[in-house]
Amino acid sequence: MSKVKEAVLAIFFTLFALSTFAQTGSVRGRIIDAKTKKPLEFVNVSIRTTGTQTPLTGTVSDSTGVFRINRVKNGTYTLTASFIGYKSVEKEFTISPTARNVNVKNILLEEDSQVIDEIKVVGQRAQMRFEIDKKVFDVESNISQAGGSASELLENIPSVEVDNEGEISLRGNSSVTIWINGKASGLSADNQAQILEQIPAESIERIELITNPSAKFSPEGTSGIINIILKKNRKAGYYGSLQVGADILGGYNASGSINYSSGKIESYLNVGYRQRKSEGKDNTDRINLDDQGNPVSYLNQKGWNNRDGGSLFTRAGLTLHLTQTDLIGIEGFGHFGNRNSNNTIRYESDVPGSFTSSERISDSDNSSKGGNINLDYKHEFNESSNLVARASWDLWVSDGTSTYKQHSLYLENKETSSWQKQKSDNRSQSWEFQADYVNQFTAESKLEAGYKGTLSSQKSPVETYSGETETTAVFDELLYNKYSYDRNIQALYATFSTKVNNFGLQLGLRGEYTDTETKSLGYGETEATAVPYKDDYFSLFPSLFLSYSLPKNHEIQVNYTRRISRPRGWQLNPFMNMTDSLNISFGNPYLSPEYSNSFELNYIKTWEKHTLSVSTYYRNTDDVIQRIRYREGDVMKSTSANITQSSSAGAEIVAKNKLLKFLDFTTTLNFYYNELEGFSYLPAGADTPVTGERDDNFSWTGKIIANAMLPYAISLQATGSYNSKQIIAQGHREASYRLDLGARKFFFDRKINLSISVQDILNSRSWHSITSGNGFKQDSDSWRKGGVFRFTLSYNFGNMKASKQKQQRPSEEMNIMEEEF
């Protein structure tokens, strides 16, 4: 460890010396409505060399009206601030060796009544913007998912996919970390689908995609981080909203929020309830093969499912500005939900000795509750350095009861019946402690360092009762399991960034020590007699970011990071789930984490009405964890294993185009090549190894969001997506597509709005996969009912005004609850 520390310090001091050569400056200011004196957000700010007409670079103002443009060379420039419905304003400024950081202070924009009368349309925030290390998507203006959930909202984010089980992938890779307000907030790979389904879409302000995070951030998730930022209004005064909605399947939702902020206090409260219903069906055809690959028998499985459930989501927070240099904040959220499902599966088979037909009916009743509490403290030593400390606690509890009834018919009219009831009680909690220090040495050089410790535990006992009927069912010793999973992660990181003329550099290093222990107890075993599975390891995660600004608003970025994907809790549990006697699944306690080396080359070009971003990326992953399937007799078994290596390379093209004053498009195309190396793996207890040949394919996905802002405060939105064929372990997934539509109308000076949306209007969304392995070929198709119309009515109220404190200190505006380190 001492050598690692010495190396880190040496790197940082070397880079610190480079900062003395910085030869560029910056310009900042604030945009204010000349009439109301309120700050204006999303105002376009550009600069050009005085005497020319070609913009050099630009930005947009934030929620407090503040803007800042860095890396401005010595010279005299003209700054232009422009916004729809306002007269443009120009200001001249000069960057010189004696005046590197210029503050143009307040820029007052006056309404242009002539433009307003001509356009007569409702403006809205830009739906996407680019930042140095991430893409930010404003979802408040998303109409097609109004009244939906966080999970449904993610389906409309470029490069993000959500499958029929709620599993999320980014750029075709499901190893992605999900955050809420910059932290895990109790989300894990085992529960994130349920929690995201309970969070109302209307409580979300924006979604950030960090595809190659630096050493400052947690390295978990080989494809990156999706950060969900919940709404938090910080303008002085009070503000609130009420919302109700319903859909044609019988679902409905209601929510309310209120915010209050004064000079030293910021507070908010949100409450929302959702009731949802869904329908779906699936089909699986399996052909069993002999050793020569010839068909010997078949199994057909058809299923129908209905799901419904309700969830309550509540969130509250309070921030106190104790002094000019100290603030403390506490916030938390809670979610309470229940989900009921009914599934009917019908089998047909000619497997010798097995049934010819069978029907299996399952009913599940699950309830869950959980929450997150954060305590934050920030101290500013001076204008250039600060310390942020946080303590966080998360809890998630899920209880479920499922019953299974099966009736089978054999040859010669023989019949059998079986009945099972399975009870589960899942409980997971985690503690997080972290401290982060920032020192802005100069306008262009910054050092960041911090610590984070995470302690998490999970307990998942399962017990089952089996018999021919409910009255004859008895406790089933073979299906009893008590599983526990404990993990301790301790991390230190440091990053240093600097700029020299048009060249930018950020170098970072993160070290993490991980200690895990799992126990899986069968019937009759105790904590004292059970043998735990233990693993501990130390990993280093370097990161390097380079950027170069070219003339005429061109910028090139190159970066490298190392990332990790640790096994999920259920993937490690060796317990064999035999509730379906023909499909048995179990985990693998000997799984190792995946490690990835990720490279990106980014190019960004901005025009007055257009923005283009092109990202090329390459990722190599060792010890890839995949789900493998193999046949033993008539039974299909599945487990997880570190089976191979994978490589992927791709290009992501994102374009924002404002074609007309009332029409804009956001288009994303993601082209990628995936390669899985061949493998041979012998599962514990199996007679023959599971093998897979090397496989590769070229895939692409596309999404387009079209927004039209019409007269009479009407806006329309259409979102279309397409996913091409993709390879998976032992097979591939077929292409799929969908189309969502939405419309919104404002009334009474935008205080009331009505939204109408329809999801998957073509009813085309399905998940179709074809797999094969030793002794089988399988074709599976899963479908969820689309064409669901939803209606949402919202009412906004309040008395917001500009905050005096924020007028005095605009450059210090910071949300300490939105960054994770």
Image (cartoon, rainbow, N blue to C red):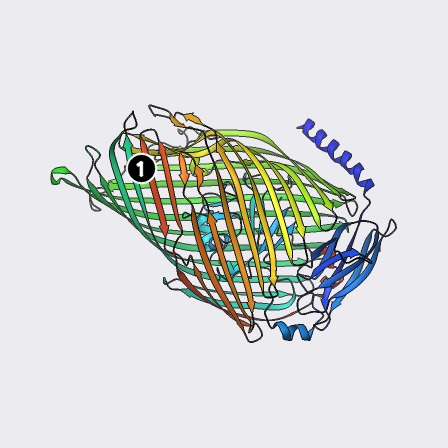
As drawn, 756 above or below 21: below
Q: Who is closer to the viewer here, 68 or 605?
A: 605
Helix, strand or loop for disc 1:
strand
Q: Nearer the viewer, residue 213 or 291?
A: 291
Please indicate, yes or no, whether residue 308 appears anywhere in the rendered image: yes
User: Could you tell me residue 94's position as x and y percent?
Assistant: 84, 55
Quadrant where the image shows the C terminus: top right
Residue at mark 1: 583
Q: Position of residue 99 (x, y in %)?
A: 86, 52
What residue lies at 70% left-to-right and 73% top-to-bottom? 112
Task: State left or right for residue 408 relative to residue 262.
Answer: left
Residue count near mark 1 (Cα–Cα under 10 Å), binned few <14, some 14–19, many ≥20? some
Foreground residue among 490 and 19: 19
Q: In which quarter of the view is residue 297 placed?
A: top left
Q: Quadrant of residue 543?
A: top right
Find residue 168 and report its horizontal and vertical position in percent. 48, 46
Q: Is residue 396 visible?
A: no
User: As rendered, which of 192 and 451 lies closer to the eye?
Assistant: 192
The amino acid at mark 1 is Asn
Q: Quadrant of the N terminus?
A: top right
- Residue 586: quadrant of the picture: top left
Where's residue 247, x and y in %? Answer: 40, 64
Q: Residue furthest top?
A: 687
Residue displayed at 55% across by 53% down: 667
